[in-house]
Image: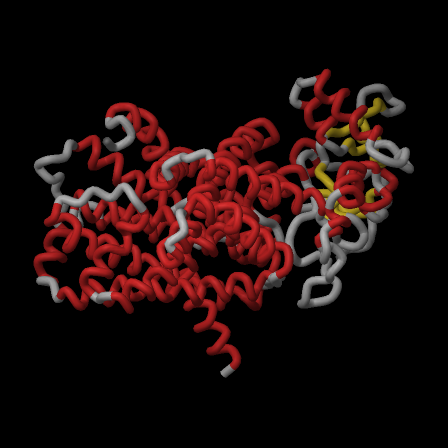
Amino acid sequence: VKRIIEVSLGILTAIGGFVDIGDLVANTAVGARFHLALAWVVVLGVGGIVVYAEMCGRVAAISGRAVFDLVRERLGPRVGLANLAASFFINFLTLTAEVAGVAIALSLVSSVTYVLLIPFTGFLVWVVIWRLPFEWMERAFGLLGLALVVALVTVVRIGPDWNALLAQALHPHVPSEETPFTYAYYGIALFGAAMTPYEVFFFSSGAVEENWTEQDLAVERANVYVGFPLGGLLSLSLMTGAALVLAPSQIQVDQLSQVALPTALVVGKLGLAVLLVGIFAATFGAALETALSAGYTVAQFLGWQWGKFVRPEEAPRFHLVVVLSLAGGVLFALSGVDPVKVTEYSIVLSAAALPLTYFPILVIANDPDYMGEKVNGRLLNLVATAYLVVLVAVALATIPLMIITKAGA
Amino acid sequence: MPPPQHDAGRVLYAGLHLLDRQLVDRDGRYAGKVDDLELCPGEDGNTLFVSAVLAGPGALARRLGARRLGAWLERALTHLGDPPANDLRILFNRISDVGDHVTLAANHDEMATFAAGRWVRDHIIHHIPGSRVRPPGPEERG
């Protein structure tokens, strides 16, 4: 029974923890502009994160090594350093967006302008990182994130023509008022949101934090194979809600609060309250993950002690990087940048940086020196390699598309 | 863990098995990376032996070709706090095992590679309440 509770708790945490500000913004914005014509990208992206998260979780459980440790070993110091610089920068943008997202969620219930809440949010994130044990931290915000299920309730409440929706998703075409370029650009944004690199930094480091071993692999697989796709379902619900409610009124998403609009209109005040709890948990959880990831990547590249599994005084440089990154994110958010724009840039640039992170994972997952008998199977390698090809194509297309579409304007 | 290896004649592909590997101290704590290697010629004059592991951002910068930056980083490090008990060269006889990581027969706190960490710990982290609190969970882990 204890096992069943553990597995279901892990799955629930994975569902609630799957969505972050990138998913919230990208899915709502895309739903409002493209209806369900890009829904297939969410499915593709979720498939990709499932395949690679499982691999890096397994690598961490068997070898005790987290992703950025391996990045340096496999790519060498020079390319590794370039990857570190790119990943750290993108992660910093994501961190900024998440902190702003938390502040916006708080401002919607407190009627205080969100800018004033940013320093408070940053401090709160730091206190949780400093004091809350890793497992509690992950559980609490993952489970609270389940409140986003209200997005699914919203879609069911609307009572849409399911067959028409399915037909739309299965026979995607570029809407007449959009160009193939904007279609591709937003597709990349969705893909980047689903496969954001910090997710594997955090997932693999978390496996080391929780001291996973071979015995935990079954739980790990359940989390990833069941939890992530159900988390993706929440993403699709947000997209569908936006397609059904925002698109007919020609509403363009340029504020985080618009994510809540379909639920507020369809389910009412209570629904809105629940959704806001979900948005708060999703962004707060991701703020914790990105702040920690800043420390994880730098410390793992340079070989410093890292993690919450030791006393803070034992990992001083790790904690310093975390707190400085958070402070930087707070200052950047305070400077008046548009949180939605920062989010969009972070997920699109994530897409451009994906191969550098995912390639070393695939290599190590096949190395018997690290993995013993737990190397990848043939089918998994086939799928993972196919994804790697997609990742490279996406990475090459990202910057040109960004220029052609003027960042999706 | 396999028994410590002290045989001086073990053949390793230094570039593959040593460079950029994680250094782990005898208590299982991370203690830096193998940022560079010091080689010295053997008696026959043809073979090179690894005499020491070089660790720290200074060694890494120098390996990547930034000599000035490397020297500056190393000097900056020696100015941080107490004179280090040993320098940034980790002699090969202090290495107890080479596997997918490199295990040291020392504690990371004794190492010069922890100089910056020690400084950050003593001057910043120790001033924050709770810095000495042990997290819950399994006691010692390696």
Q: Which part of the image, by quadrant, shows the C terminus of chain A?
A: top left
Horizontal side, residue A183 vs residue A390: left or right: left
Viewer-nearest residue: A315 or A131: A131
Residue A59: tell me if it is visible. Answer: no
Q: Please state if A9 lies on the left or on the right of A136 as rendered.
A: left
Query: In terms of depth relative to the viewer, which is nearer, A249 or A175?
Result: A249
| Residue A219 image point, x, y percent | 49, 68
Quadrant in the picture for residue A268 = bottom left
**Hey, which residue is sitting farthest top in the picture?**
B68
Quarter where residue A11 is shown: bottom left
Q: Position of residue A15 (x, y in %)?
A: 39, 63
Please tell me which residue is depicted at 80% across the width and 44% down the height of the picture: B122
Q: Is residue A324 left or right of residue B52?
A: left
Q: Residue at x 79, y 55 (%)?
A: B27
- Give x and y (percent) for residue A242: 20, 52
Residue A52 vertical placement versus B93 (above, below): below
When asked about the image quadrant of residue B34, the answer is top right
Q: Is residue A404 above or below residue B133?
A: above
The residue lying toward the viewer, choosing from B133 and A109, is A109
